[in-house]
Amino acid sequence: METGAVVLGQEAGRASPTTSTPRQHDLLTEGKSNEMSEDMLLAQAAAFLQAGFDTAAATLTFLIYELAYNPEAQDKLIKELNEAKEKHGDDVMEISVLSQLTYLNCVIDESLRKYPHLGWLDRIATVDYKIDDNLTIPAGTPVYVNAVGMHYDTEMYPEPDRFNPDRFLPENAGCIKPFAFLPFGEGEKIALYNVRGTFVPLWPP
Ligand code: HEM
C-alpha cells in the first residue's frame, strides 16, 4: 500500500472492494486501484462534516423550537424518555435504545417534515422516461422533485402547519404514500446517515 492511501473497506472488517459496483469503486478510487488517495480521503471527510453537521444541528434546533410551542408533545416525549431510562438504567442512552423509542422518532420525523433541509431533490434523467401517454422526460433533462411541497400536501398531511408527531405513529403510517416523506432524499443519492442512527450502506453496496 502506498503511503497516505487507504485500502477501502478492509479496516472496518467489511467485504473487499471487489464486491462493490464498478461505479462506486471508480468514483472513490478514481478508477486506478483499490487505494483511496489522501485528497479523496480528505474530500470525503470534508463532505461528511459539511453534510452531517448543520443538518443534525438544524434538525435539533427546529425540534426544540416546536416542543417549546407544543407542551403536550413535550410531556409525551419526556414520559417516554423517563420510562426508557428507568428500564435501561442509564443516564446516557445508547443509540440502539433511542432508535426504538416510537414517539421520539415521530417527533424527529415531524420536525423533518416541517423543516426539510433540502426543499427539493435534483436529478438528471439518464434515459428517456415515460410517465404516461402525454409525458415522456427526455434523457438529459434536469428534474426537480418538490419535497417540501409533498411534506405540506393536505391529502397526506392534514393541517400541515400543525406540529403533530402522531401522524408518524405506526398505526397512521398508511396515510403517507411512499416517497412523500423525503427529508433524507431517496434512491442512490439518499443521505449517508439518518438521525435514527442508521448508516445507509454506500460501501459496500
Ligand atoms: C438530519 C440529518 C440529515 C439530513 C436531514 C440529511 C439530508 C440529506 C439530503 C436531503 C440529501 C440529498 C439526498 C438526495 O438527493 O436524494 C443528503 C445527501 C447526503 N448526505 Fe445527508 N442528511 C443528514 C445527515 C447526514 C450525515 C450525518 C451525513 C454524513 C455523516 C450525511 C451525508 C450525506 C452525503 C454524503 C450525501 C450525498 C449522497 C450522494 O450524493 O450520493 N448526511 N442528505
Image: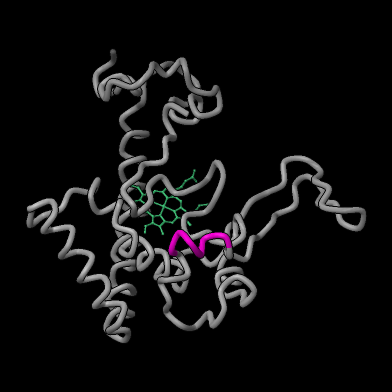
- Give coordinates of residue 54: x percent, y percent: 32, 62
The quarter of the rendered structure image containing the N terminus is top left
Q: Main secondary structure of the magenta part?
A: helix
Q: Residue at x 39, y 16 (%)?
A: 16
Judged from this view, the residue extending furthest toward the bottom is 69
Q: Residue at x 64, y 60 (%)?
A: 145
Q: Is residue 173 above or below residue 205?
A: below
Relative to 12, is 137 on the left or the right?
right
- Give coordinates of residue 196: x percent, y percent: 34, 52
172 or 106, which lies in front? Answer: 172
147 or 36, which lies in front? Answer: 147
Q: Residue at x 28, y 15 (%)?
A: 2
Q: Residue at x 27, y 75 (%)?
A: 64
Judged from this view, the residue extending furthest toward the top is 1
- Give coordinates of residue 135: x percent, y percent: 87, 56
163 or 21, which lies in front? Answer: 163
Judged from this view, the residue extending furthest toward the right is 133
- Give coordinates of residue 84: x percent, y percent: 18, 58
Q: Which residues are magenta?
A: 169-174
Colouring convention used in this rendered image of the protein: one colour
* Residue 25 on the magenta segment: no
Mark count = 0
Relative to 109, is 97 on the left or the right?
left
111 or 141, which lies in front? Answer: 111
